[in-house]
Amino acid sequence: MHLLVVDDDTELRNLLGDYLRKNGYHVSLAADGKDMRKILAGNAIDLIVLDLMLPNEDGLVLCRNLRVHSNIPVIMLTARGDETDRIIGLEMGADDYLPKPFNPRELLARIKSVLRRAHALPDSPESKGGRYLQFAHWQLDTVTRNLLAKDGLVVALSGGEYRLLKIFLEHGNRILSRELLLDLAQGKDTDPFDRSIDVQISRLRHRLGDDAKEPAIIKTVRGEGYILVTEVGSNP
Amino acid sequence: MTNWLPRTLFSRMLGILLLGLILAQALNRAIHLYEHQKMATQSSQIHAARRVADLIRLLSALNPETKQAVVEQYHDPSLRIQLAKQSLPSNRTDEPNNPKFKPFRSTLNELLGDKPPTRISISESLPHTLLLHVYLVDGSVLTLKTDLTYDDEEGSSVLLHLAIILSIIIGFSFVAVRWVTRPLQQLASAAEDLGNDIYRPPLLEEGPIEVSRAAHAFNTMQASLIRHIQDRTQLLAAISHDLKTPITRLRLRTELLDDSDLRTRFQKDLDEMESMVMATLDFMRGVDQQETFQPVDMMALLESIQADAQEMKSEVTIHGTVLLPFLGKPTALKRCISNLIDNALKYGHSATLFVEDSDERCIIRIQDQGPGIPNEQMENVFIPYNRLEISRNRDTGGTGLGLSIAQDIAHAHGGDISLNNTLTGGLEAVLILPRVR
């Protein structure tokens, strides 16, 4: 796996390089957009770790330009950590977002998860680039991580419920196995006897007002897993 | 101030105004009455003097027999007359200088001409009763008693008159004083609001000059308070913000260390630093002004926090329910309740929630099984960066900001958080959130 780290802080850039190499990745380093384009032109990059605050062209501009012709996953780093950055970052097509100061292990986990998602399940195109994901009679706000009902009622989700729902919305109309859901939503290794996904699904159905006996949003596929059966749209 | 004085400016002004007006009215009335009485006395004396003069002139032209008959004819309750053959000893003497009878005496002298037929002595037998001894030329003595009273104005009509005037005055004063004191009340409630919301909209600078100047001064004060707070906030936020990159670098360096024992200790220090920086930024950012009030499913909110806690193997139980959506800021509310539950889990091993709901408010009680807080320290725990290290486990650390942030959020919703020790030991945090209508 070949990663590209773009950060203008030399110390941080080199440390990130060392850390990721230590964890088995091939890493290239770039200080700004010019370096980044040079490296992208000569190498097959699997994922970009991109700092938001860069001289000349900032991370948002770089990400948007990249998206025009490329689908390389991007993890955005920022020191600001407020919601507007997250909104803009996700709108510009970043796959994930990590506020500084981050735990390096968290970055590693995110890199793994984004790479796995990119390879195992290419995202459905309509789920990218909007703050709100629309389905059935709900909207999922990917910034505040709340569900919004048609009448404006705000329904909070736990971290687990949110991750699970987001995976379903990004991969609508596709059967997702328990193992895959466990792997993507909880980062756990596959255990055929782990029923925690079923518990989470039933809680999620309850939140969505979906009848467990005759679900209309997330259906059970006997022996295979679960499937989201509504149309998904995205709104900025 | 003595406590019998009225407390409000409104009642004081009303009192002063009414007292002044009533006094003026009473004085006016008294002067009017005095003048009226003087006039009435004068005219009744003149009237009496005319009758007496007529009688004297008539009697002096008659013979003694006819005199007696005429006297009897003239006698009536307002002019009581007696005729005696000769002078009777009298203990009353003439009071020629009594100013009270001056109108009477001068009228009588005028009417009887320069040669009076007789000698007259005038005195007062009873108040308002004039006693006259007239020594006629033939030696007989005429004794006259006449009342100098006059018809008083009808008392009840005076009272009615007064009552009408007074009620007009009271009504007018009430409206006028209210009109004058209203801007002051607005100023006072604005000052109260400022305690809850420093960003409240400025006052309208209108009304009388004094009031609009006070409003202007108030607005200036509010603006400089906001500026002051913002300067401080920016400074602290900038410091905390600038610490983020070095902390990130340190974290990476730590991960590259080979000594795993040293690495663990570094990580612990970094965790502490990071949580302080993040909580400071959180606190400085305050309750997000941008976040709008939205209807929130409170049970979903509580259960999502419960599920998150369960994922971390912590026990959170919820009793009771909230049926109707609560109008609030969803992200802020979640942070507020999360902070309270985190505290219960951190210091009290478990969190038990009791939820009460009514039309007026939602009450969420969060109880733990910990050691509680000494009563004298109860208020201190809301002070930013204040930690109760004596009674609480040092290892649990914390930033001392969690409760301050939660309290800020409660206040932004017009609510409040209070703490008390439960009977079974352990701490109870009571979050009261009024429902806005």
Image (cartoon, rainbow, N blue to C red):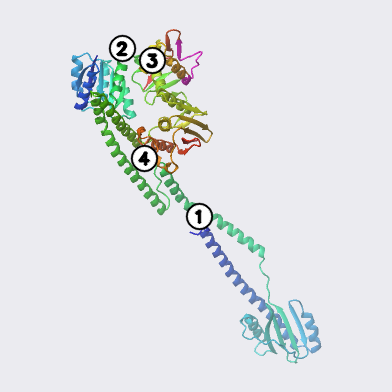
Q: Residues within 10 Å of mark 2 (few under 14, many from 20)?
A: few
Which mark, by number, is residue B386? 4
User: Which chain is disc 1 placed on?
Assistant: B
10 Å crowding of disc 4: few (<14), some (14-19), many (20+): some
- For residue A180, which quarter of the picture? top left
Marks 2 and 1: same chain?
no
Above or below: residue A161 compared with residue B224: above
Is residue A211 located in the magenta-colored stretch of the structure? yes
Q: Main secondary structure of the magenta part?
A: loop
What's the amino acid at mark 4? Asn
Residue A179 coordinates in the image, percent (x, y):
38, 12
Label 2, on which residue?
Answer: A119
The chain carrying label 2 is A
Chain ID at mark 3: A
Q: Nearer the viewer, mark 2 or mark 4?
A: 4
- A181 on left or right of A62: right
Q: Nearer the viewer, mark 4 or mark 1?
A: 4
Disc 4 from disc 1: Cα separation? 39 Å
Give the amino acid type for the residue marked by disc 1 in the picture.
Answer: Arg
Residue under the image location 53 percent in, 54 percent down: B174
Callout 4 touching callout 1 (CB < 8 Å): no
Q: CA distance from mark 2 to mark 4?
A: 49 Å
Q: Nearest the camera: A66 or B270? A: B270
| Residue identifier under label 3 | A182
Q: Quadrant of residue A77?
A: top left
Identify the amino acid type marked 2: His
Magenta stretch bounds: A206-220
- Mark 3, mark 1: which one is toward the viewer? 3
The circle on residue B7 is 1
